[in-house]
Amino acid sequence: MKKKLNSSLIITLMLALLALACTPHKHEAGEEYTCPMHPAVIADAPGACPVCGMDLVRKVSEGEKVPITPDLASLTRSANEKIRSSIRTVRGEYRAMPVTLEAKGTVAYDTRYVRTIPSRVGGRLEKVYLRYYYQQVKQGQKVAEVYSPELVAAQREFLYLTEHDATNTGLITLAKNKLLLLGLTEKQVTQIQKRKDVYTTVPVFSPVEGYLVPATTQAVTATQGAQPSAVSGMDGMPASQPQTDAAGAAIPQTATGSALREGDYITAGETLFRLASASALRVELNLPAAQATSIKTGTTVKLDFENGHTNQAAVDLVQPFFEEGEAFVKIRVYTRNTGDLHIGHFVQATFTVDPHESLWLPRDAVLDLGLDRIVFIKNNDSFSARKIEIGIRTKDWIEIRQGLASADEVAANAHYLVDSESFIKPANEP
């Protein structure tokens, strides 16, 4: 009996030792744990950081392999790696595509019907009644008052003859005609004779009706080496002289076209104001140069003035040059529907041009980077970026001019493949 009890005890001890050996350790001897935010914190067992409270993580020993998880694999992928994907692809279609182009523009005044208000005498502007551009001006409206020594002297000469030499009708007639040539009216001359006094300032009236528009920018230069007159202003006042550089050459000065103000000096024949007729308007549209190549004089255009009115018109002029600082071609269209329009009114235009035969690709397949356009070419089961040159754009299609063949398969939606720098940069660039 005693021998059987000893055998049972031995078996029980062996089973306990076996179970203890099979129990996993929470951490191996020599492992260290640290805080990701405070590397100075070191512990020999898992726990919390005494500084920030974060969980301690095990430090990887030298030479230990790190398991590659899917998230880590996406971050460590080579920048030159190609994308393997099964997304839908399309091919360019070579056909005659009916083209409908859209453009935006504004209503502007017709420069063929711009009238000017000149000054017949030189002098100083005492009053200016036109304060801002596109101000409406009525026919016969007073626009300015000018002080002119020449006109004052002519009035005094006329009064002297009428008072002291009334029988000399010839000289009186010449003096009166001189006043009329200097800009006075018959009524003003009669009033001068009645009141027997001169007008120190002479009003200037608008001969036409319209809107005040900026003057055309003009470059004013002086001949190199020429010395301007020191006394060329009003009543012997020195006029402003052109600036010169170190060599004595005149520096070009540009008139900005700003409106005249009170106190400015003017010369005989100088244009004071420019008035555009309100009944003569035109539409100026802006179109990218690549699309403007298919627009010609006479092309039909539908104008939507966004006020419930539309008009069918034809292109009158395609501007053959670019304005400085612009990347658009201006297209001029004349319209008869001017009743509800004003200068600066926004216009939406739709052009209908003849079918254009070329290689076309859906718009979604082209990635526009601003200066470059990119498509993703499929090679076997991977995609790589390629730079292309485009032409006309329609609502759903883009004309491909260079960089793509009709046999090339491209990603149907290029934006799905933009997840790395390497695909934005064309493959043919370093």
Image: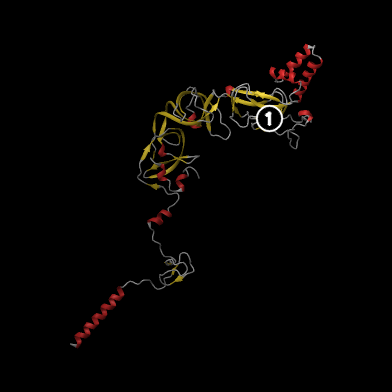
Residue 167 or residue 202, whichever sits in front? 167
Residue 110, position as x, y percentages in the image: 56, 24
Give the image location of residue 34, x and y in percent: 45, 68
- Identify the residue at the far front of this view: 195
Q: Which residue is mark 1?
A: 127
Residue at image x 77%, y 14%?
Answer: 172
Q: Residue at x 19, y 85 (%)?
A: 4
**Which one is nearer the viewer's eye here, 35 or 200?**
200
Q: What amino acid is found at the position of numbered circle 1 in the picture? A: Lys
**Image quadrant where one finds the N terminus:** bottom left
Give x and y (percent) for residue 99. 42, 29
Quick one: which residue is furthest to the right in this view?
Answer: 164
Seen in the picture, residue 328 relative to 300 is either above or below; the reply is below
Quick one: 128 or 110, which is closer to the camera? 128
Can residue 212 be spotted in the picture? Answer: yes
Q: Residues within 10 Å of mark 1 (few under 14, many from 20)?
A: many
- Residue situated furthest left in the rendering: 1
Q: Which of the 4 image quarters holds residue 265?
A: top right
Instruction: Estimate the x, y position of residue 301 in percent, counting from the top left.
Output: 46, 25
Q: Nearer the viewer, residue 195 or 281?
A: 195
39 versus 237 height, above or below: below
